[in-house]
Every structure is written in C-alpha cells, then in structure tokens.
Image: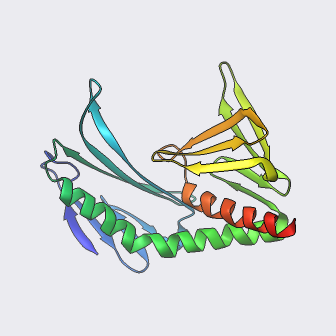
C-alpha cells in the first residue's frame, strides 16, 4: 500500500504513507513491523462548543524506541468517505498479523509465568490489578477472575466486580495501548478459568 494522503478535509499539505510486508512509513518516519509491541486505534467526534463538526480517525504503532501516530480528520462531512476508507484500508493491511504476533507473545508469557502486564493492567493467576485516578491520588483496583465482568463499549473497555459495585474501571481506547489484545487475553483466561471449575 502506498498513498499520498491529506490528513484533514481542509489540509493542503500531503503526507506519504507506505505499508509493505516489513515496514510502515508515515510522514518520513519508518518502523519495522517486527519491532511493533503496541498498537491502538479509535474514532472520535471533533467537537466545537458541544456540537459535532467532524470525525477524528487515529491509529498508533509503538516500538521500544519509536512511535507513529496517524491522525485523519474530516470536517462537516467533507471527505468523510475518503478518510473512513483509508482508515479501514490501513487497519486491513496491518491488523491481523500484528495483533496475532502481540497476542501470541502475551499468551506465551501468561502460560509460562501466569503474569502479564498489558494496557495498564496486570493479569495474575488470581485476578486483575489496575489503577484509576481517584480524587487526590491513584486507587489500586483488584478484581478476582470469578468476579470479573468486562464489557466493550464504543469508546472504552469497562471492568466491574460482580460482588462489589464500588469496584470498577474504564480503560479508554484513545488513552491505552493494546486494548484489543487485552480483550482477547481476558476472553482466553476467562474460558481457561471456567474450564478449571
């Protein structure tokens, strides 16, 4: 895939995007696919005084040393089909091989150590630990596997404790890396735990 794209409806400047079997080039920066350890994507609205005036498409790739963030914005519906098509085309080109590789690496780590750190969470043999911002400081959240309920919403992944409604957590897609990998791991571990009981 090779494309000279405009990053927004009214942008005059163009940016080169090239994705091949081994690498991703965006705006003069290249990273190897094999080095990518984290990724994220989301779509949000562009707002002006609480009115939606467009859409913001974002895709991020992170390695140990580098990061590529692709931001595409449509305003007032202008070029929205172009940006949605481009967004989906980029994801189609990279998503399956990258997520499979990152998922398999984390699954190996889980199988060997029963401990995985991903998307701001620590998955342990007895449950999941994370933190959320409290009024003054961060609060530690711990939920046992048998009490964990998670739900994928439009803009976030939510965790709740089925035994204690005061224990909950929201992980927003725009703020956290590898959420999709985390969801796959949670599904795998939940099934594994059910099979053991």
Q: Horizontally, is 26 left or right of 188 in the view?
A: left
Left or right: residue 90 compared with residue 109? left
Q: What's the coloring here?
A: rainbow
The percent position of residue 25, horizontal first and vertical second, equals: 35, 66
The N terminus lies in which quarter of the figure?
A: bottom left
Question: Residue drawn at (26%, 63%), measured in percent from left and top?
Answer: 86
As drawn, 147 above or below 21? above
For the C terminus, give its image quadrant: bottom right
Of all residues, the one furthest to the bottom in this rendering is 21
At horizontal 78% and vertical 44% (from top left) the residue drawn is 143
Q: Which residue is drawn at 16% across and 48% down?
A: 9
Across and down, in percent, residue 38 comes to 55, 59
- Point 63% across, 58% down: residue: 182
Residue 95: give x, y in percent of width and height: 45, 69
The image quadrant that residue 142 belongs to is top right
Q: Where is residue 7 in the image (x, y as percent from the top left)?
A: 23, 52
Q: How many labels sit on residues?
A: 0
- Apparent side of residue 108 relative to residue 79 in the rendered image (left or right): right
Residue 28 sits in which quadrant? bottom left
């Amino acid at each position: 895939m090779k494309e000279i794209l405009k990053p927004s409806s009214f942008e005059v400047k163009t940016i080169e995007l090239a994705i091949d079997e081994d690498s991703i080039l965006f705006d003069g920066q290249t990273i190897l696919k094999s080095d990518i350890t984290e990724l994220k994507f989301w779509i949000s609205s562009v707002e002006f005084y609480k009115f939606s005036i467009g859409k913001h498409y974002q895709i991020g790739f992170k390695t140990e040393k580098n990061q590529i963030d692709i931001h595409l914005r449509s305003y007032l519906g202008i070029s929205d089909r172009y940006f949605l098509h481009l967004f989906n085309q980029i994801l189609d080109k990279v998503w399956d091989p990258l997520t499979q590789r990152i998922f398999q690496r984390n699954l190996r780590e889980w199988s060997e150590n029963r401990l995985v750190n991903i998307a701001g969470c620590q998955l342990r043999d007895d449950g999941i630990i994370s933190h959320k911002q409290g009024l003054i400081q961060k609060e530690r959240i711990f939920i046992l596997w048998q009490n964990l309920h998670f739900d994928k919403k439009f803009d976030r992944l939510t965790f709740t404790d089925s035994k204690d409604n005061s224990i909950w957590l929201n992980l927003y897609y725009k703020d956290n890396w590898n959420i999709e990998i985390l969801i796959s791991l949670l599904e795998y571990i939940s099934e594994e735990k059910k099979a053991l009981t």
